[in-house]
Amino acid sequence: MGITYCGPYADALADDHEGYAARILPDGTETGTWTHATREFTGYRAHCACGWRGSAAYPATDEGENLAVETWGRDHLIPLVNTVARRHTVTGEQLLTLVRELRGSVDRVGDEQGAGLLHAVERIEELLDNLAHDEAVR
Ligand SMILES: [Zn+2]
């Protein structure tokens, strides 16, 4: 009935994040069950199967339903995915530390092999510089 995420890092997220537009009933209760008993409602609110609820209430229209679903994605799902993505991202500082360690190791290698390794390290440094420059431009 709801929306489940299947993009990057989906396997790392808990299975219980199914978003939906809950109906707000006249007595104030909110439900994801759309039956004859819940046919009269005053609006929609973003809900997730994990228990998360959006703060905004939207009109009882198709647009309101869409806004509730969009709220679930923007305010709940994307922050969860970003948290997982950060755990799987190598930072620039970690890469620079690795390159410095490589450069230190190259200095201890013989001339011919060392020249090839030094070239590889310099190429990595160049790529990192370009990445850093691209980040600064954004
Ligand atoms: Zn959730």
Image (tube, rainbow, N blue to C red):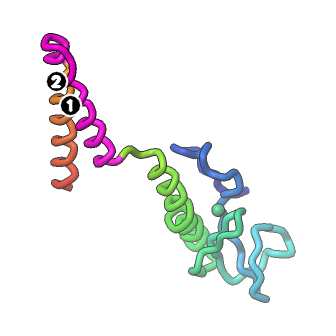
Question: Which of 78 and 99 lies nearest the eye of the viewer?
Answer: 99
Above or below, 34 against 81 in this view is below
- Real-space CA distance between mark 1 and mark 2, rounded to the nearest whole angstrom: 7 Å
Identity, as a three-letter code, of the amino acid under mark 1: Arg
Residue found farthest to the right = 37
Above or below, 40 against 87 in this view is below
The quadrant in which residue 69 appears is bottom right
* Picture disc at residue 103: 1
Image coordinates of residue 29 in percent, x first then y, are: 77, 82
Identify the magenta region: 91-116
What's the residue at 44%, 52% (across, down)? 86
Q: Is residue 53 left or right of residue 30?
A: left
- In terms of secondary structure, where does tag 2 sit? helix
The quadrant in which the N terminus is found is: bottom right
Residue 9 in magenta? no
**Label 1 crowd (10 A; few <14 / some 14-19 / many >=20):** some
**Label 2 crowd (10 A; few <14 / some 14-19 / many >=20):** some
Judging by the rendered image, the residue that carries numbered circle 2 is 118
Identity, as a three-letter code, of the amino acid under mark 2: Leu
What's the residue at 48%, 50% (across, down)? 87
Q: Are marks 1 and 2 in contact (CB under 8 Å)?
A: yes
Q: Quadrant of ligand 1?
A: bottom right
